[in-house]
Image (cartoon, rainbow, N blue to C red):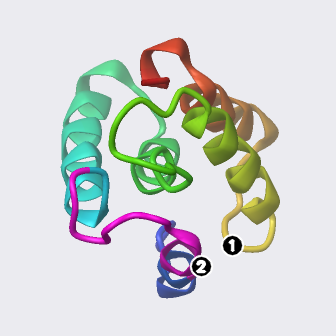
């Protein structure tokens, strides 16, 4: 079963505050997904976590500039969706939440 289902995209889109096709919108998420999946081939990262990160990491941005809390909000959002919109092992969910919250993903 696909990790990124239509229902998940619909939920993300309904709450997304920015331009869907803008700087931090769906085209950016598709590029993050593509690059992340390429990296996963050599790093061994779980592709399910990579794909979910790609679609969730900027989903709670309030602007396209400095929004230092968007990663924390994305992690909280992901946690509310876990179990209903996607299934991950506990360790994989923690990896997703850590990646969303991460310092390199805070600007």
Q: In this view, does 19 lie to the left or right of 63?
A: left
Q: Residue 85 carries which label?
A: 1
> Residue 44, position in %: x, y?
39, 26
Per the rendered image, the range of residues in magenta is 11-23
* Residue bearing mark 2: 11
Foreground residue among 54 and 72: 72
Residue 20 drawn above or below residue 100? below
**Which residue is located at x 58 percent, y 35 percent?**
71
**CB contact under 8 Å: marks 2 and 1:** yes
Q: Please identify the dominant SS of the magenta region.
A: loop
> Residue 48, position in %: x, y?
50, 50
**Which residue is located at x 71 percent, y 55 percent?**
77
Q: Which of marks 2 and 1 is nearer the N terminus?
A: 2
Q: Is mark 1 on a helix, strand or loop?
A: loop
Quadrant where the C terminus lies? top left
Q: Is residue 22 magenta?
A: yes
> Residue 83, position in %: x, y?
81, 65
Q: Quadrant of residue 45?
A: top left
Q: Quadrant of residue 97?
A: top right
Foreground residue among 65 and 76: 65
User: Alpha-carbon neighbours of circle 1 within 10 Å: few (<14), some, or many (≥20)?
Assistant: some
Q: What element carries label 2?
A: helix
**How many discs appear?**
2
Q: Is residue 41 left or right of residue 82?
A: left
**Which residue is located at x 31 percent, y 71 percent?**
20
Residue 91 drawn above or below residue 50? above
> Residue 81, position in %: x, y?
74, 64
């Amino acid at each position: 079963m696909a990790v990124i289902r239509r229902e998940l995209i619909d939920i993300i889109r309904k709450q997304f505050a920015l331009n869907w096709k803008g700087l931090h919108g769906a085209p950016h998420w598709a590029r993050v997904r593509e690059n992340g999946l390429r990296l996963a081939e050599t790093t061994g990262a779980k592709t399910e976590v990579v794909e979910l990160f790609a679609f969730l990491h900027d989903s709670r941005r309030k602007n396209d500039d400095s929004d230092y809390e968007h990663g924390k909000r994305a992690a909280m959002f992901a946690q509310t969706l876990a179990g209903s919109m996607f299934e991950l092992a506990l360790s994989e969910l923690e990896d997703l939440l850590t990646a969303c919250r991460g310092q390199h993903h805070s600007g």
